[in-house]
Amino acid sequence: RWIKFEEKVEDGGERWSAPHVPALPLHSLFQLRTCLQKGTMLLDLDADSFKEIIDKALSRQPEEEELQPALKERLAALLLLQPQHQPTKSLLQLLAELGLSPCRGRKPGCPTRHPPPASGPGQSEPRAQLSKTPLKEQLRNRFKKKVPPGAEAAHVAVGEVEFLEKPFSAFIRLRRGVSLGSLAEVSLPSRFLFILLGPPKVKAYHEVGRAMATLLTDELFQRVARQAEHREDLIAGIEAFLDELIVLPPGKWDPSARIPPPSHLPSPRRRTAVDPLDQQPHGNGDMTAAGDRASPGHPRSGEELERTGRLFGGLLRDIRRKAPWYGSDFSDALHPQCLSAVLYIYLATVTNAITFGGMLGDATANMQGVLESFLGTAFAGFIFCLFSGQPLTILSSTGPVLVFERLLFSFSQDHSLDYLEFRLWIGLWVAFFGVVLVATEASHLVRYFTRCTEEGFCALISLIFIYDSLKKMLSLADAFPINWQYRLDNVTSYSCTCNLRRLFNPILTCLTTLHHPRLPPIQSPPTTLAGLSRTQCLDRGGHLLGTSCQYVPDVTLISFLLFGATFLFCTALKRFRSSRYFPVGVRKLVSDFAVILAILASCAADAVLGLETPKLLVPSELKVPAGWW
């Protein structure tokens, strides 16, 4: 059993050992990773009983690992047997048993005591079935006093089964903690279950189970296991655990020796922030001196958030730290896996610059528009990336920037100010304040920001983008109204013609007007021309007549369909990584390019339909907008 450290049953199965640091064979972790890669994986399972959990685990096996129906029934019956627990006895109970049993010390002539054998197939005493309610022994077990409040149980069931020809493994995470009756040693809500049963020819089941239990007591892996959405997330958690693993060479220590728990454990935040390979001893040889300098009220920060006390000291330190990796930033981008990220960022940046550029042009009377937003984003991004700027900074226009520009333009109009000149001075002052903040190393204040600040800002940006996209889609109904009154049966009555009224004779009309100033000019009768487009008709001074002149195709409907299809198709391709179809490499490739494939598919569908859906308007030439000179 494990709380933070491992405890074993010893002394003939009569008492628990002292807690100690578990020592795991390295091969058991590799075998555990294989079990999670190939075995049954059920995440956020809804179940209220252990029997329901076993039934769902056996019914959702991978096709290549699926058992025969008869084996499933025998395996379910075996797992539903009542397990035998080693109760934690009080001191009075131990003294009473010691007084009643003179052979407890194994004196000469006394038989050796062994734990009662577990009954099973072929044994005379059948074991009871698992109880749906906690037993009295569970409720009276003194071990529960060691369990911290709010804790949940994880069950690891491993062993050898004679009727199985190949191992059966399953990792199950319940959506909520559920009491599974008499399954646990004490009555606790259960959240995780790991099962590994197989033929007796493989002898590593016990060590794999110990490895799984050790991982589940690790705080970082617990976080991964609780938040994992796919099988790959758990595999990544094991890989991160292996990255921190320290191997003791065989022959240099005694495997039977138990390592006592340390007096102080490193915090999970410190484990994620500090790489063991990057730790270098300080002048006094203490590798934890830097961690000890952190204040107790705040987590330990990295070197980049520590003040140097010199003017531009933080900037110079960042340059020295980044210089060795500057070349690899360009060479690593040539990896094929980075291509999907490059294409995605490119499309996201271009579409964002064009979309917000159009909205910026509407808000500023085209003082700033698509061209300015596009070129500004490209120039700023080029300089920013060339100097290895912070990658999470948003360079292009965003919702708050658009709101600021709209208010600034309105303020300039109300107070008779030149908007572009006003905007130039604002940019110069922002640049000046930025230089001052860099010179004084003000970025170290980030260490005091909480996660709430970051999440709040991200939520604001996300809501603005979602609102703007939905607003843009709903505005299509104004330009392309849905034809609610259109009826297919009345198609013969629908028509639209161009009605032209032309002056009969300009010279004759002029003379007539001179002699008869009160008479209107002589006009020709109305002329109806066919074959003219709507634009040609209006340019010639005509007007449209007919019941179908206001008809437009259902562009709004198809736009909403393309809008939803792009999102759903992208989501489906992202989840294709955990699908059962195609090899792992193909699934990973499709998942990496999910956004690009979804956009291309929707654009292809729009091109095939041929409807005049609204497109992003990109200027065809570079020119200075009005008001810049």
Image (tube, rainbow, N blue to C red):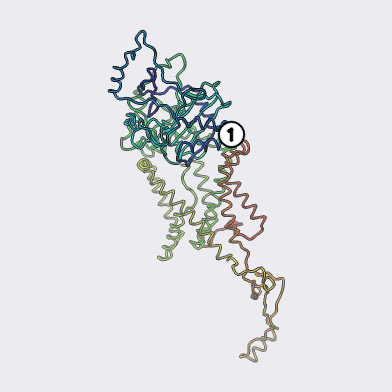
Residue 382 in the image, given as x and y percentages of width and height? 53, 45
Q: Nearer the viewer, residue 504 or 512?
A: 504
Q: Is residue 527 visible?
A: yes
Q: Quadrant of residue 21?
A: top left
Q: Quadrant of residue 176?
A: top left
The location of residue 285, given as percent across then percent down, is 36, 23
The answer to whether residue 273 is visible is no
State left or right for residue 332 relative to residue 225.
Answer: right
- Looking at the image, residue 330 sits to the left or right of residue 408; the answer is right
Where is 623 relative to 113, above or below?
A: below
Residue 502 location (% of width, % of height): 68, 80
Q: Is residue 483 above or below residue 507?
A: above
Pinpoint residue 9: horizontal percent, then vertical percent.
Answer: 39, 21
Q: Quadrant of the N terminus?
A: top left
Q: Please name the amino acid that badge 1 sits on.
A: Pro
Q: Tell me the residue that label 1 is attached to.
A: 69
Q: Is residue 475 above or below residue 98?
A: below
